[in-house]
Amino acid sequence: MPIPNPAAMEFFLNRRSRPAKILTAPVPSREELLPILTAAARVPDHGKLEPWRFLVLEKQALARLAALARRRGAEMGLEPERIEKGVLQLSEADLAVAVVRVPRPTVKVPEIEQILSAGAACLTLLNAALASGWGASWLTGWHVHDAEFCREGLGLGAGEWVAGLIHIGTETTTPPDRPRPDLAAITTWVSE
């Protein structure tokens, strides 16, 4: 017989991300962040390939990346509002963890399974931060989809890309919950 974990189920039924713009210091210390990263590294990983890695971006690194985003956005000819949105995502943050998708050549595990594992690492990192009492948000943006920004700013290698920036901090306000999907509209029961 299954052994239920009501506390875990309650967490999942009520979890919600916190917008990055409401997160501030204090942020987890390196010691406090280690169990969160450990949880994220326990995601399904067919073939034990570890097709992801973590870059912990602290305040000074985020400021450097914000300046790079401003420069790259201008070089790319992006609209000023779009540039500013990417810059603020970095400059206003106190801590973010970049989950980097790392391709692992293998004939055994399809690429899509490796990509899904990187996404699972993002979600588990987000949920582990929330379960630890921190506010957290999973974001991306034009800057992390720009290969030059990722190469120069994050040191990403060939074939690597950012699956998500998980912002972690102390929430300044509790946002209202958003409407959730209509389960009946998205679920099909297949009996035979």
Image (tube, rainbow, N blue to C red):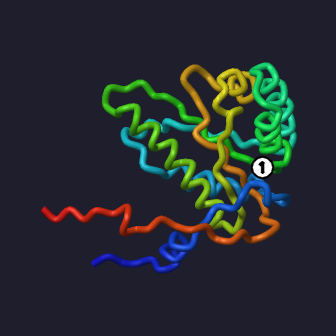
Say whether residue 90 is left or right of residue 47: right
Vertically, is 24 above or below 44?
below
Identified at 40% across, 78% down, the residue is: 4
User: Up-down: is 24 above or below 156?
Assistant: below
Q: Which residue is mark 1?
A: 95
Number of numbered markers? 1
- Residue 11 pos. (x, y %): 55, 73
Residue 179, by quadrant, is: bottom right
Which residue ends up furthest to the left in the rendered image?
Answer: 192
Query: Toward the viewer: 183 or 165?
Result: 183
Point out the image quarter for the C terminus: bottom left
Q: Quadrant of the N terminus?
A: bottom left
Residue 146 position, x and y percent, is 67, 26
Q: Quadrant of residue 187?
A: bottom left
Residue in the picture at 82% in, 33% down = 80
Q: Position of residue 21 (x, y in %)?
A: 79, 55
Crowd tier of the residue under label 1, counting other residues whose Cα lies within 10 Å: few below 14, some 14–19, many 20 or above: many
Q: Quadrant of residue 114?
A: top left
Is residue 186 found left or right of 77 in the rendered image? left
- Three-letter code, disc 1: Leu
**SS under mark 1:** strand
> What x and y, as percent, mark residue 54?
63, 41
Report the residue at 72% width, 69% height from top: 175
Q: Residue at x 71, y 30 (%)?
A: 154
Please state if 14 lies on the left or on the right of 28 as rendered.
Answer: left
